[in-house]
Every structure is written in C-alpha cells, then in structure tokens.
Amino acid sequence: FMVIRDENDYVFGVFLSDSISKECKLFFGNGETFVFNISPNMKKYGWKGMNRFFIHCKSDTLTFGGGDDGHSALVLQENFEYGISQKSQTFENEILSKNIDFSPCVIEVWTFKNYW
C-alpha cells in the first residue's frame, strides 16, 4: 500500500499488485491493483477492464493507472515532491486529491510478505 496526505489534508493512495522496480519500459501489475480515497470521503476504485495500465516506473516518476487520453489516476514525480491525479480509464476514478496538481506532505508505504 502507498498512502498519501496532500497539502489540503486529502488522504488517498494505491494498492499495488506487484513490487516496484527502479525502471520499466512497459506498464505492469494486474487487476488486483486499485486506487482509493480515505479522506474527505472513503472510496475504492478497482480495475474496470478497459486496459492494463496498472503500474509504471521511471527513475523520476511513479505512475498508477492510465489511458489513451494520457490521464493517470496517480503520478508522483521529482522525489515525491510533486503529484498529479486525474480520472483514468484503468480505474474510472475521480480525482483523488482536491486539485489535479498536489504536493504530498506525508507518504507511507506498507509492504506484506507471504511466508508460506
């Protein structure tokens, strides 16, 4: 899980179906990936089957969700100092932050390991 609180006290994030690598050329992940809001309103946006644009990594950018229109559910750039949230075809989500452009104030990442 990655959970973000922005400068407007909106809390939102993403559940990743796969581990993040430093850089990849293609989107990866699967339909278990989803984005969500916690505050001001709690809502989960799961995969809608339109495409497979789940997770994309570059050395300076993390992208979650996407579409032919170039809009992503969540993008973190520049060492997590700048973010973008838009409606994406992958999740058919609303904008997760108050505004399309946001500044992350707090980012928490939780991982789980299967021991069996």
Image (tube, rainbow, N blue to C red):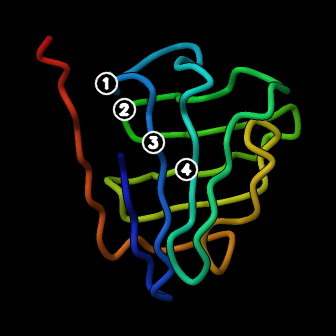
Task: Residue type at mark 1: give it.
Answer: Lys
In this figure, which residue is indicated by the disc labeled 3? 15
Tell me which label, 4 or 1, sits earlier in the chain. 1
| Alpha carbon distance from label 1 to label 3 | 18 Å
Tell me which label, 2 or 1, sits earlier in the chain. 1
In this rendering, position of residue 42 left or right of residue 104: right
Task: Residue type at mark 2: give it.
Answer: Ser
Q: Are marks 2 and 4 in contact (CB under 8 Å)?
A: no
- The one nearer the camera, 42 or 25, is 42
- The one nearer the camera, 110 or 78, is 110
Q: Are marks 2 and 1 in contact (CB under 8 Å)?
A: yes
Question: Quick one: label 2, few (<14), some, or many (20+) residues within 10 Å?
Answer: few
| Alpha carbon distance from label 4 to label 1 | 15 Å
Query: Which numbered disc covers residue 22?
Result: 1
In this figure, which residue is indicated by the disc labeled 2? 59
Tell me which label, 2 or 4, sits earlier in the chain. 2
Task: Check disc 2 and report its element: helix, strand or loop.
Answer: loop
| Alpha carbon distance from label 3 to label 2 | 20 Å
List x then y, in percent, for residue 33: 54, 33
Task: Name which residue lies at 60% across and 72% down.
Answer: 97
